[in-house]
Amino acid sequence: MKKFFFYIVVIVCCCSFVCSKPDRDAKVLNQPQQVGVSPELGVKLGSDTTVREILVNSDIPPDLQRILKAYPDYIDSVDYNTIFWKDGTTMIYDDGIKDKTFEEKLDNPDIEDMMSIEYIKGDNYPNPPPANYDPGRIRYEPFFEKIYGENETEVRSFLVKVRWMPATVNKSILITSANGVNRQLQAVSDELDRLSSELKKYVNNPAGTFVYRVIAGTNRKSTHSYGIAIDINTEYSDYWRWDKTIDYKNKIPLEIVKVFEKYGFIWGGKWYHYDTMHFEYRPELLIE
Ligand SMILES: [Zn+2]
């Protein structure tokens, strides 16, 4: 009988030890609290901007914490390898497949791959970018489909018009209202509108925003398909696919780029596979 009680005690102790191990079950919760930012205006990204309470947990990859901060309206919480969406679904961060080549990462990425190349905002980016330095060009499509729409009809249902640079161009362009991207682009537009005419020439004839299509030469969906991208004036642009070689070229001034980056848009001009007219909304790569 004594032996029986001994075993019971051992089992109870083991159970409570296992149950109290918190690491792998720890979640970071999204606790939105905007500080001094009107939702009507673009939300500037960076230290003086959106402030969200994050319970720091060493078990949560920093890139996942960044994703949580960047998409507060859609993501409820994250744990060490999972995104918990507000619609009740989940997504895995690391698919466990190691040693993917760069091409494999492009064609079959997970969210970890998507975040694997650091985007450097401002002036001090690698220039020219070294081979395959393409921050943001690896995209896990289900992630974007979840937010911006799974098919053309769904994406179109979120599209709204933005007046592009009303004081200079006043052209109507289509952009998604999902995730507030239209407000972010309007903020970019308003700021570009205040630049000198010498700088405005790079952005005064936008070449396109929403087009439901795959990227030329691939089966991958372009971010233009989600209504989160804009191509600025093609007259001053360079694109690696237009060139016979992949020798980095750029004519777009960094003053333009910095305005876009401030509001969550990354620039294709920082890629080895350069596309200097292209900007897309990717706050997870810019948020600190
Ligand atoms: Zn583009």
Image (tube, rainbow, N blue to C red):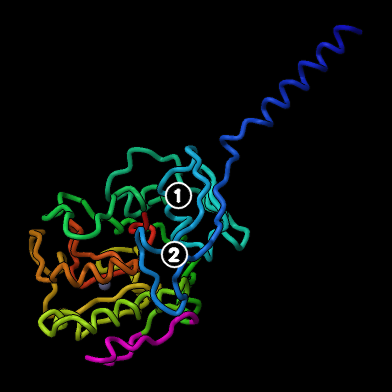
**What segment carries the magenta color?**
157-173
Q: Residue at x 54, y 48 (%)?
A: 28
User: Does residue 233 appear in the picture of this structure?
Assistant: no
For mark 2, give the secondary structure.
helix
What's the residue type where badge 1 is placed? Answer: Leu
User: Does residue 224 appear in the picture of this structure?
Assistant: yes
Residue 250 spot, x, y in % from top left: 10, 67
Q: Quadrant of the N terminus?
A: top right
Report the residue that reaches farthest toward the front. Answer: 36
Q: How far separated are the C-alphas under marks 1 and 2?
A: 15 Å
Q: Is mark 2 within 8 Å of ligand 1?
A: no
Magenta span has 228? no
Q: Is residue 251 above or below residue 15?
A: below
Q: Is residue 49 above or below residue 153?
A: above
Q: Quadrant of the C terminus?
A: bottom left
Instruction: Residue 64: give its label.
Output: 1
Residue 269 found in image quarter: bottom left
Quarter of image, ligand 1 = bottom left
Left or right of 251? Residue 172 is right
C-beta proximity under 8 Å, tags 1 and 2? no
Q: Residue at x 17, y 70 (%)?
A: 255
What's the residue type where badge 2 is placed? Answer: Phe
Q: Is residue 61 above or below residue 242?
A: above
Query: Which residue corresponds to mark 2?
Result: 144
For mark 1, give the secondary structure.
helix
